[in-house]
Image (tube, helix red, strand yellow):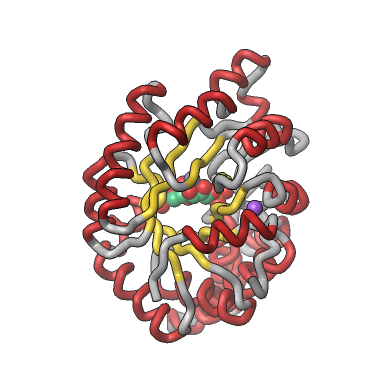
Amino acid sequence: PLVTSKEMFRKAYEGQYAVGAFNVNNMEIIQGIVDAAKEEQAPLILQVSAGARKYAKHIYLMKLVEAAVEDSGLSICLHLDHGEDFEICKACIDGGFTSVMIDGSKYPFEENIALTKKVVEYAHDKGVVVEAELGRLAGIEDAVNVSDRDATFTDPDQAVEFVERTGVDSLAIAIGTSHGAYKFKGEPKLDFERLEKISDMLPGFPLVLHGASTVLPEFVEQCNTYGGNVKGAQGVPEEMLLKAGKYGVCKINIDTDLRLAMTASIRKYLYENPSEFDLRKYLSPAREAIKNMVKHKMRNVLNCSGK
Ligand code: G3H
Ligand code: 13P
Ligand code: ZN
Ligand code: NA
């Protein structure tokens, strides 16, 4: 069935691992991820951004995920990624999602609280869970000094107050990860001291890591070998994500790695088969590439296989 992430997070917290939350935009991506979860017997969150809803339409994604549940027999959580206002959260709650994110991180603390609270009240009434965000995603080198960093990264005391006052079910925090393929200019670095502090102050509470793709070098290289131009891309090292899973992080968001896997595969296929134009020919290996990449994550990075 479609389920909330409540039980998944409870088990992930206890077991010190993380559940993967994968962004989906079309059928092949959904099928690749769901096949991986089935083979790994892993918990699964599929998430949909506003951009994905615009691209594929809410109803298509909803029906595809329902088909995935029915076909695979898996329990899947369907989550709205980065909901920017009450209206989009309401549309997804009313439209069958089991989880929504209200991202009020760009607002001042009190406004973020008020907005999050409003979504929590509406969602909980309908049995839907809510993720919020506190702090702004930015790389460590974007914050040149300590006070800069304090202004951007999640403040532990504020996190506790935020969770208490909103009644939110999980919280995305900023400790140095960022969205996309260019996360670090030099050495990858995350503020684990901050994560540990937040985690200690919120015992039993699930934290969420956004911008957590590893940007696998093999896919970047494959893109560049077959006509692409993806230079200087760098993601979060696998061992850092494994470590985060031990400090209360129960949900790890992955989009960029899906995009890179699929694009690398399609580039290679079309380069090697320039006269081919049956899209099933290049989307099949692309779907397979997603499956294998997700399986690798579940086993070695999220540590959620068989859980
Ligand atoms: O956080 C952003 C996700 O990667 C979704 O990206 O808004 O381009 O669909 P998108
Ligand atoms: P990546 O860009 O690192 O895959 O992060 C995705 C994300 O956080 C979606 O909300
Ligand atoms: Zn995100
Ligand atoms: Na965890």
Q: Position of residue 24 (x, y in %)?
A: 43, 63
Q: Which of the pair 42/13 is nearer the observer?
A: 13
Relative to 303, is 112 on the left or the right?
left
Kindly identify the residue that appears in the image at 52 percent across and 75 percent down: 32
Q: Position of residue 148 (x, y in %)?
A: 60, 16
Number of disc labels: 0
- Is residue 220 visible from the viewing direction of this image? no
Kindly identify the residue that appears in the image at 62 percent across and 21 percent down: 149
Q: Quadrant of residue 219?
A: bottom right
Q: Which of the pair 37/177 is nearer the observer?
A: 37
Relative to 202, is 188 on the left or the right?
right
Relative to 217, is 255 on the left or the right?
left
Kindly identify the residue that appears in the image at 26 percent across and 52 percent down: 125
Q: Position of residue 40 (x, y in %)?
A: 64, 77
- Is residue 12 visible from the viewing direction of this image? yes
Q: Position of residue 68 (x, y in %)?
A: 41, 79
Where the C terminus falls, by quadrant?
A: bottom right
Q: Which of the pair 178/104 is nearer the observer?
A: 104
Kindly identify the residue that appears in the image at 41 percent across and 78 percent down: 69
Seen in the picture, residue 151 relative to 267 is either above or below; the reply is above
Where the N terminus falls, by quadrant?
A: bottom left
